[in-house]
Structure formats: C-alpha cells, structure tokens
Amino acid sequence: MPYICAWIHFIWATKNREPLIQNDSKIELYKHIRENAREKKIHLDFINGTKDHVHLLVSLNSGLSIAKVAQLLKGESSKWVNENKILPHYFKWQEEYIAVSISKSHLEKVRNYIKNQEKHHNHISFQEEYDEFMKVHGFEIIKGG
C-alpha cells in the first residue's frame, strides 16, 4: 500500500472571470463540490472563493493526478450547476487553473488564506492575485512571459 502526502492548492476561475458565483449559489456549489469529491475519494480539505474564482486545498491519493482531480471537480461541478439551474445563466469554469504543492508545515497558513478570500479581495483583485501566483511559482517562464 502506498503512503502519500501530497497537498495541492488549486485555483480556478469562472469563464472569462465573470462574477457568477453569488452568496446563495456559492454555498450550494461548494457543498456539491465537497460531496462530489467525497464520492470520488478526493480528500478536499478546504474550499472557498469569491464571485469569480475558487480555491481548494486537496490531498492527493495514489490513484489521482492533479489534472484528473481538476477535471473531476471542475467539469462535474459546472455540469451540475447547469443541469440543476443553480444559476439563472450558463455556467462554465475557465479551462486553465493553477495547482501548487504545499508543504505540511504551511497547511494552516493556506487554510487561513483560503478561508479569508472575501477579505483578501477587498485589497487585491483576482488578476493581481493570479499574477502574483504566476510570478512566485515561476509560471511566467512556462507561459513565455
């Protein structure tokens, strides 16, 4: 039996970063993502976000890659929102996402960061946050920036 400790901080946005996730739908959406993760044996430790994006803290297991977790949670949740008419308009997540590894010693810091998303975004836009993640983690090199 493999023993794995691999924590991943995911971030993904609504299509075109439209502010589609309102308070009532946010609670329902996050609850569904948690339930879906549990059904798929994905350990979703923490989830929160704002009207245009979401942060998740996930512990990977031996059977799932980062790409597969993103596919299972993003794809299924947008399909669920549309099939159940959770929002009055078509909903879709943006194709790209950010996934960064988190050391065990930083888990509480990341949980607090995710927990305080609304407060955090009173001071910094999602674009500024996104640009900072891209810079800090070296993704601008990958994108050729």
Image (cartoon, rainbow, N blue to C red):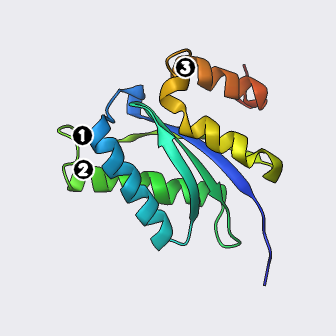
Determine the residue positioned at 68% across, 22% down.
Answer: 132
Q: Where is residue 97 in the image (x, y as percent from the top left)?
A: 57, 40
Q: Residue at x 49, y 42 (%)?
A: 48
Residue 76 seen by the camera:
no
Left or right: 22, with 56 as reference point: left
From mark 1 to mark 3, how far is it between C-alphas? 23 Å
Hey, what amino acid is under mark 2?
Answer: Asn
| Amino acid on which disc 3 is placed | Gln
Q: Are marks 2 and 1 in contact (CB under 8 Å)?
A: yes
**In the displayed structure, would residue 61 be above or below residue 144?**
below
Name the N-terminal-most of marks 1 and 3: 1
Tell me where residue 62 sits by quadrant.
bottom right
Q: Name the residue type under label 1.
A: Tyr
Indicate the position of residue 16 as horizontal and vertical percent values: 40, 27
Classed neighbour count for the residue bearing mark 1: other residues with Cα under 10 Å, few (<14), some (14–19), many (≥20): few
Per the rendering, the mark at residue 114 is none
Answer whether residue 89 is visible to the viewer in this image: yes
Left or right: 107, with 17 as reference point: right
Q: Nearer the viewer, residue 1 or 67?
A: 1
Helix or strand or loop: what does disc 1 sit on? loop
Which of the labelled discs sits on residue 90, or is there none?
1
- The residue that disc 2 covers is 82
Residue 57 image point, x, y percent: 61, 50
Q: Which label is found at residue 127?
A: 3
Q: In which quarter of the image is the N terminus?
A: bottom right
Residue most toward the top?
Answer: 123
In the image, residue 145 sits, relative to residue 95, either above or below, namely above
Element under disc 2: helix
Instruction: Kindly state the secondary structure of the residue where label 3 is placed.
Output: helix
- Circle 2 packing at 10 Å, graded few (<14), some (14-19), many (20+), is some
How many tags in the picture?
A: 3
- Marks 2 and 1, Cα distance to the nearest angstrom? 6 Å
